[in-house]
Image (tube, grey):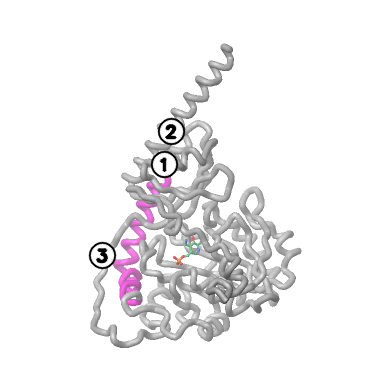
Amino acid sequence: MSIEELARKTIRELTPYQSARRLGGSGDIWLNANESPFANEYSVTCSRLNRYSECQPAELIQAYADYAGVDSKQVLTSRGADEGIELLIRTFCEPNQDSILYCPPTYGMYAISAETFDINTKIVPLTPEWQLDLPSIENNLNGVKLVFICSPNNPTGNVMKRRDIEKLLDMTTDKAIVVVDEAYIDFCLETSTVDLLAKYPHLVILRTLSKAFALAGLRCGFTLANTDVINLLLKVIAPYPVPVPVADIAVQALSVAGRAKTKYQVLDISANRAYLQAGLGMLPGVTVYDGYGNYLLVKFSQADALFTALWDHGIILRRSPIENCIRISVGNRDECEKTLAFIRAHVISQGNASANNDELNASN
Ligand code: PMP
């Protein structure tokens, strides 16, 4: 048997997640992975590296609980929110039997994590306004253990209506867990559903330090949920999931000074987002959708040609599955200015070219 044949059928047939990193590219401006443009300094002590870390470092758990406004017993830390997704699926779904439900266009890892564990996926697309299609979700709950929703949603950037999330929680009581992925919530904390944990025992919230806290390379995420859920996840998680230096750095990021820095950087990124939105919105044939995270989804009349022109020019953005849309992570002001200038020149030259063609056609 070849090595390939030894692998599970599911894995042989799986198309892995096409992360921004895997897609590669070469350039000076990287606005494709919703990372922060800020690289902050931290100190790391190496004196304890001969010892295993705590499974759930108490200081880190307490620091995130304080930040999120929950009890420390309601917090689990893991290798990014991505590991949180995986743990939930492994904990709640029976392979080849149960399903997860998700609402595209949305983050791709819900489906991929489910597939790797032979969990079925039920797909209920968002409405044309990119909101939850509650009647359709209700009709598809049979066999569903986890409903994933993402707010602010990646890649569309909008937030889900709070009333709809509450209705979804009401409709899933005693049936399924509702997972609200709040990876980008720090850019619009007022829309968080964290207060609903007190009312709904089947609500789970995913958080991360990868975005607003500018620590994508640290791989540190959190699951917020009631203790019954957290205790189940603790049965499944690996024995020493948080490296000692990760816990050290995360605690510094969540200190009073670290949180103040993040708040300032969130304001800075939000100002750049407004700058990009205003600049792009003025261009002919361009639609910028309101975005609440650190990225914008933008529709162009010829997105593929523009994407390639940007790529060739060393400006690496993210193609989106939504027709003619490109997702642009909000960088620092210089990156935003250069990106806007290139797009403006490209869109205007294309507009002129097609106007010239029209004139030629009219005179022929
Ligand atoms: N959820 C969403 C919506 C995301 O966009 C991302 C990051 N791309 C994640 C979760 C995973 O975040 P982390 O870096 O914490 O694994």
Q: Which residue is mark 2?
A: 346
Disc 1 and disc 3 in contact, CB within 8 angstroms: no
| Magenta stretch contains residue 252 | yes
Q: Compute the Cα span from label 2 to label 3.
A: 37 Å
Rendered residue at 28%/83% (across/down) = 49
Q: Which residue is mark 1?
A: 310
Disc 2 and disc 1 in contact, CB within 8 angstroms: yes
Q: Which of the two residues, 48 or 72, is positioned nearer the viewer here?
A: 48
Q: How many marks?
A: 3
Labelled disc at residue 219 = none
Residue 291, how many percent across, how many down? Answer: 50, 50
Task: Give the label, 2 or 3, closer to the camera.
Answer: 2
Rendered residue at 63%/68% (across/down) = 147
Range drawn in magenta = 247-276
Say which quarter of the image contains residue 217.
bottom left
Against 362, residue 265 (above or below) is: below
Disc 2 and disc 3 in contact, CB within 8 angstroms: no
Labelled disc at residue 41 = 3
Rendered residue at 35%/77% (across/down) = 247
Q: Residue furthest top?
A: 363
Badge 2, how many Cα within 10 Å: few under 14, some, many 20+? some
Q: Earlier in the sequence, mark 2 or mark 3?
A: 3
| Magenta stretch contains residue 52 | no
Looking at the magenta stretch, what is its main secondary structure? Answer: helix
Q: Earlier in the sequence, mark 2 or mark 1?
A: 1
Residue 332, how many percent across, how many down? Answer: 33, 49
The C terminus - image quarter: top right
Badge 1, how many Cα within 10 Å: few under 14, some, many 20+? some
